[in-house]
């Protein structure tokens, strides 16, 4: 019995991988291949659009695993030259006040231009302990702006495929999780630049973005998520800002990566926090999957 492969949250059977190989051998560009993969395998977003970015990432990972050989990229996008970590930059040129009242208006600005994207990457590579890595699939990024300058960054992307504390809290079995997972969005990055020391700022921003994100996500992808999740590394952070913003602690990860089949605890243990975006989120996420 042939084994399936999982890429970007999707299982690919051996028959489907043969379809992918056929498309790779017959089409001239990576973009055309990704679009065709989405069409042939019905890999679509809830609004019916192709999951083209997820398909591109999946194809790159298939090539890395020796399953396909892609045509060379036509236009270098520079992704391979973006460092995960960078030297800390002086992003603020004036002293920042110590209270929210003195700080004044705070704006959450969606990253939707090349300039804002470079700025976001620079901040995250300079100051976030995980550094910069591209997100796959549906995502939203924000810059936290004030009259004193940019004071931080937020990034939201696809949720974890499996997470025992979250799945138990929701009441998920595997088929229901697969059908509803797109309704959970992961807070993949949250950064306040180190020179900013404003009491309650982090929890204030988290509360603001929780109100803002469902509308922005709907505008971008045609559906509204009902739950946020995040993972807080226990050895580095206490999770105080998430607690103050009313995120729900549901347990700890096991400290295992996706490929850690030998239970070697290759990753740090993290606390799992959830934030409901709808009061009936558990019902919406765990209701039976309609028959096909």
Image: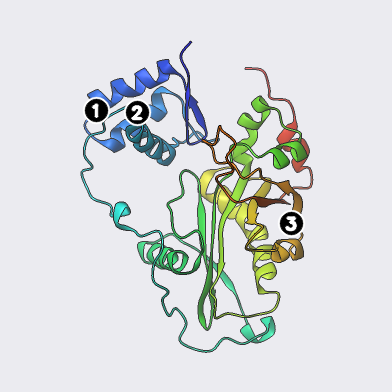
- Nearer the viewer's eye, disc 3 or disc 1? 3
For disc 3, the neighbor class at 10 Å (few under 14, some 14 to 19, many from 20) is many
Residue 142 % position (x, y): 52, 63
Which SS class for mark 2?
helix
Q: Earlier in the sequence, mark 1 or mark 2?
A: 1
- Residue at 62% x, 30% y is 179
In the picture, measured across the screen, residue 147 lies left or right of residue 239, that is left
In the picture, measured across the screen, residue 238 lies left or right of residue 40, that is right
Disc 1 from disc 2: Cα separation: 9 Å
Up-down: is 110 above or below 90?
above
Disc 3 from disc 2: Cα separation: 40 Å
Which SS class for mark 3?
loop
Q: Which mark is residue 27?
A: 1
Residue 199 % position (x, y): 69, 78
Of residues 253 and 170, the one nearer the viewer is 253
Q: Quadrant of the C terminus?
A: top right
- Residue at 44% x, 65% y is 120
Q: Which residue is mark 2?
A: 36
In the picture, measured across the screen, residue 146 lies left or right of residue 17, that is right
Residue 51 % position (x, y): 45, 37
Of residues 109 and 248, the one nearer the viewer is 248
Disc 3 vs disc 1: Cβ atoms closer than 8 Å?
no
Q: Earlier in the sequence, mark 3 or mark 1?
A: 1
Up-down: is 54 above or below 232?
above
Q: Which mark is residue 247?
A: 3
Disc 1 vs disc 2: Cβ atoms closer than 8 Å?
yes
Which SS class for mark 1?
loop
Q: Earlier in the sequence, mark 3 or mark 2?
A: 2
Residue 28 % position (x, y): 21, 31
Up-down: is 142 above or below 171?
below
For disc 1, the neighbor class at 10 Å (few under 14, some 14 to 19, many from 20) is some
Residue that lies at the very extreme toward the top in this rendered image: 1
């Amino acid at each position: 019995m042939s084994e399936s492969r999982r890429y970007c949250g999707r299982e690919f059977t051996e028959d489907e991988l043969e379809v992918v190989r056929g498309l790779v051998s017959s089409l001239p560009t990576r973009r055309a291949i990704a679009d065709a993969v989405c069409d042939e395998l019905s890999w679509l977003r809830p609004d019916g659009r192709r999951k083209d970015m997820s398909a591109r990432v999946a194809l790159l990972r298939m090539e890395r695993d020796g399953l396909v050989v892609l045509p060379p990229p036509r236009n270098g996008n520079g992704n391979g030259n973006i460092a995960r970590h960078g030297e800390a930059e002086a992003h603020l040129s004036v002293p920042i006040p110590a209270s929210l009242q003195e700080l004044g208006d705070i704006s959450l600005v969606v990253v939707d231009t090349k300039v804002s994207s470079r700025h976001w990457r620079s901040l995250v590579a300079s100051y976030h302990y995980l550094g910069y890595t591209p997100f796959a699939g549906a995502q939203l990024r924000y810059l936290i702006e004030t009259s004193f300058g940019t004071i931080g960054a937020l990034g939201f992307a696809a949720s974890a495929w499996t997470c025992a504390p979250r799945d138990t809290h929701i009441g998920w079995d595997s088929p229901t999780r697969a059908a509803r997972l797109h309704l959970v969005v992961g807070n993949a990055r949250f950064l306040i630049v180190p020179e900013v020391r404003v009491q309650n700022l982090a929890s204030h921003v988290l509360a603001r973005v929780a109100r803002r994100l469902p509308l922005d996500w709907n505008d971008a992808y045609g559906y509204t998520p009902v739950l946020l999740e995040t993972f807080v590394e226990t050895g580095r952070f206490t999770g105080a800002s998430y607690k103050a913003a009313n995120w729900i602690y549901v347990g700890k990860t096991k400290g295992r990566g996706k490929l850690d089949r030998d239970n070697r605890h290759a990753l740090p243990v993290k606390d799992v926090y959830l934030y409901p975006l709808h009061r009936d989120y558990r019902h919406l996420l765990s209701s039976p999957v309609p028959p096909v």
